[in-house]
Amino acid sequence: MEFPSPLVPATLIRRYKRFLADCLLDDGREVTAHCANPGSMMGLAQPGTKIWLEPNDDPKKKLKFGWRLVDHENGHFTGVDTSVPNRALRAALEGRLIGGLGDYHTVQPEVRYGENSRIDFLLEGSGLTYVEVKSVTLCRQTGLAEFPDSITARGTKHLGELADMVGQGHRAVMLYLVQRTDCDRFDLARDIDPTYAAAFSAAREAGVEAIVLGTRISPDGIEVAAPLESLV
């Protein structure tokens, strides 16, 4: 998935109110960017961090920049926009590029199910496969990506609803897309949200599958990459 507009480098001044970030462009201008990430962004939002912004000229948008990447300045990047995984995964699913998720003829995004929820992708083939997607950006140990980075009651609810789909005779998959290029392993952050971790264990026992995929990230775009080692 290529970014619609070329990204521009900047330095983070501060992130606040979850969805706003003041940034300093390389030309000296200070701008406010939209931060499309409701999580804590632990380890990614320190003032002075090098980041990449996507400009826009959409008159309907109040903010003319969107925060897309953290540049770790060692050849690695983290994608911070939580809307990106679904866009990148849709292209990969439609191209049947994800192992274990290729035996279907229809990919439907954002289908209503459960209790007032929407599944990220409903795949139709010989049966129905429900795929819930989570963006993973937390890294507290070298090479290890973790989810979640804050308490997520919504994520816990989704795990229960996936288990319900298995109980109704369907296939259900929890797909974690690691938006970091510096990680090759994945685990749950059980200390951050033990309720989510317990719900994950219950969902796995009920038959919900888990897939962990890596990404290739640059200021040009984000692509789905090979599976990562999962410790769950």
Image: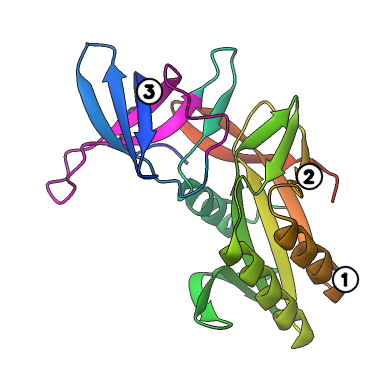
Sequence-wise, the earlier of marks 1 and 2 is 2
Q: Give the magenta-colored segment's residue range.
A: 41-70
- Is 145 placed above or below 159 here? above
How many discs appear?
3
Contact flag, marks 1 and 2 (Cβ < 8 Å): no
Instruction: Classify residue 13 as left or right of residue 137.
Output: left
User: Does residue 100 appear in this view?
Assistant: no
Question: Is disc 1 placed on a helix, strand or loop?
Answer: helix
Instruction: Classify residue 24 as left or right of residue 67.
Output: left
The three-letter code of the residue at mark 2 reads: Asp
- Is 32 placed above or below 87 here? above
Question: Which residue lies under the disc numbered 1?
Answer: 205
Q: CA distance from mark 1 to mark 2?
A: 17 Å
The three-letter code of the residue at mark 3 reads: Leu
Q: CA distance from mark 2 to mark 3?
A: 28 Å
Image coordinates for residue 108, horizontal then vertical, percent: 52, 71
Q: Looking at the image, which residue is at 34% across and 22% down?
A: 13
Quick one: 131 or 61, which is closer to the camera? 61
Instruction: Classify residue 14 as left or right of residue 94.
Output: left
Q: Looking at the image, which residue is at 70% across and 75% down?
A: 160
Sequence-wise, the earlier of marks 3 and 1 is 3
Question: Which residue lies under the disc numbered 2?
Answer: 187
Image coordinates for residue 38, horizontal then vertical, percent: 46, 50
Image coordinates for residue 64, horizontal then vertical, percent: 21, 37
Q: Is most of the magenta stretch helix, strand or loop? A: loop
Q: Is residue 42 magenta?
A: yes
**Disc ID at residue 12:** 3
Q: Is residue 197 magenta?
A: no
Question: Is disc 3 placed on a helix, strand or loop?
Answer: strand
Image coordinates for residue 209, horizontal then vertical, percent: 79, 64
